[in-house]
Amino acid sequence: MKLGVECKRLADALHEKANAAQDPYIKAEYQYLVRGFRRLAAQFDQQDEINKKFEISKKDRHERNSCAQRKER
């Protein structure tokens, strides 16, 4: 399971606990944790997108270089 998905799942579970909490201080703590896990999930998702783009461009560069080397021979 990807880290972003795992963080979202944890954030959802903590959100349910925050809604069920009766003590306002405990509820605030859960909400704080939910925001943190959602922020982490967004960062992991963003990093996954960057990694995908880098891998694609790296693959394209490799193919272009190998085609250019074949033409030179």
Image (cartoon, rainbow, N blue to C red):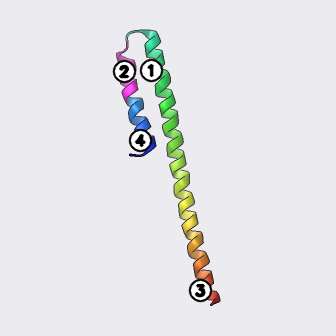
Q: Are marks 1 and 3 in contact (CB under 8 Å)?
A: no
Kindly identify which residue carries mark 3.
70
Q: What kind of element bears circle 4? A: helix
The residue at 54%/47% (across/down) is 47
**How far separated are the C-alphas under marks 4 and 3?**
43 Å
**Which quadrant: the C terminus?**
bottom right
Q: Are marks 1 and 2 in contact (CB under 8 Å)?
A: yes
In the image, residue 38 above or below residue 50: above
Query: For the magenta stretch, what is the residue range?
Result: 13-21
In the image, residue 66 above or below residue 56: below
x%, y% of residue 67? 58, 81
Q: What secondary structure is the stretch in magenta mostly built from? A: helix
The residue at 61%/87% (across/down) is 71
User: As drawn, is 52 to the left or to the right of 10?
Assistant: right
Kindly identify which residue carries mark 1.
30
Check if residue 15 falls in the magenta segment. Answer: yes
**How far separated are the C-alphas under marks 1 and 3?**
60 Å
Closer to the chain start, of discs 1 and 2, is 2
Kindly identify which residue carries mark 2.
17
Q: What kind of element bears circle 3? A: helix
Q: What kind of element bears circle 2? A: helix
Closer to the chain start, of discs 2 and 4, is 4
Kindly identify which residue carries mark 4.
5
Closer to the chain start, of discs 4 and 3, is 4
